[in-house]
Amino acid sequence: MTAALEAVGISVSFGAVRALQDVDLAVDQGKLVGLIGPNGAGKTTFVDAITGFVQASGSVRLEGREISSLPPHRRSHLGLARTWQTIELFDDLTVRENLAVAGGRPSLPSSFAEIVFGRQPRAERLAEEVLGLLDLEGIAEEMPSDLSQGRRKLVGIARALAGKPSLLLLDEPAAGLDTNESRDLGRRLRRIVDGGLPTLLIDHDMGLVLGICDEIYVLDFGKLIARGTPEEVRRHPDVLAAYLGKSAAEVEPGASKVGAAWAAVAEGAAEQ
Ligand SMILES: Nc1ncnc2c1ncn2[C@@H]1O[C@H](COP(=O)(O)OP(=O)(O)O)[C@@H](O)[C@H]1O
Ligand SMILES: [Mg+2]
């Protein structure tokens, strides 16, 4: 089966900074793929390269179609959806309206049906579907500014889904969430992916990423240093070293905040 996303040899430079060097990454149909790495590793730059927001070299295929020469809006029309590290919702629209304006990709047959049969407009139907999928019906009429950070994050994801994408790219959706919210987000993300939407998940919450992803890629200083199942990645010495800034042999649980979190994960404490 053609991969949902196939990125080959992606490189990005900002002046002298080589933010990404020859990165290969694929997201297969039906899969939830994680992308992790320390701050500044190049994760957001990778999403920017795939979506066309920075200039990159290399090949990007979306369901087999080469999109690397297309501008961001064309890539988005072809089914590429992303969320941003900071959420932007329309604060003067309700949750439901925020989803409805996100639209649905234009497609002639359904618009035709809408005209001929007077069906509920497609964007509104999609908004309903997404509200149901994410269990957000209860807050559909609320204003985003009245919601918790966790709920706002979910609405941001819902809005990306309302465009009926073929691939979802999530940049730190769990940032600012507490443990319970993050776990809850994980269950919903898994449901979205199992419902047929392949997804690339970037996050610092190791419990979340290791707990729900099928496969994980690890970036450090712009280069891929590991790729594998959560089990393989959590044992990978280069990954431990990248996170702790030490060789794996020197790793002491509790040496730092990240170290403690990672050690907990390595010991399998993060059950999802
Ligand atoms: N627009 C930019 N101009 C210059 N340098 C940038 C820009 N965006 C990112 N960088 C640099 O590229 C590297 C990767 O950044 P980023 O992709 O944001 O990392 P991550 O998301 O993994 O934390 C960092 O060294 C960062 O400072
Ligand atoms: Mg980032």
Image (spheres, rainbow, N blue to C red):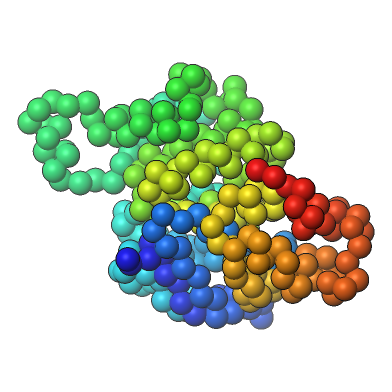
| Residue 9 shows in the view | yes
Residue shown at 79%/55% (left/top)?
Answer: 267
Q: Position of residue 52 (x, y in %)?
A: 44, 64
Among the 4 quarters of the image, the one containing residue 217: bottom right
- Is residue 80 positioned above or below 162 on the image? below
- Taking the view exactly as shown, the residue that stands out farthest to the left is 116
Quadrant containing the N terminus in the rendered view: bottom left
Q: How many marks?
A: 0
Quadrant containing the C terminus in the rendered view: top right
Among the 4 quarters of the image, the one containing residue 163: top left
Residue shown at 72%/37% (left/top)?
Answer: 179
Tell me if 146 is positioned left or right of 253 in this view.
left
- Is residue 54 positioned above or below 192 on the image? below
Between residue 264 and residue 38, name the one nearer to us: 264
Residue shown at 51%/44% (left/top)?
Answer: 190
| Residue 222 shows in the view | no
Q: Position of residue 92 (x, y in %)?
A: 48, 25
Between residue 83 and residue 256, name the one nearer to us: 256
- Is residue 47 positioned above or below 138 on the image? below
Tell me if 171 is positioned left or right of 52 in this view.
right
Q: Position of residue 122 (x, y in %)?
A: 25, 34
Q: Position of residue 107 (x, y in %)?
A: 20, 46
- Is residue 193 positioned above or below 263 on the image? above
Tell me if 91 is positioned left or right of 179 in this view.
left
Residue shown at 69%/40% (left/top)?
Answer: 176
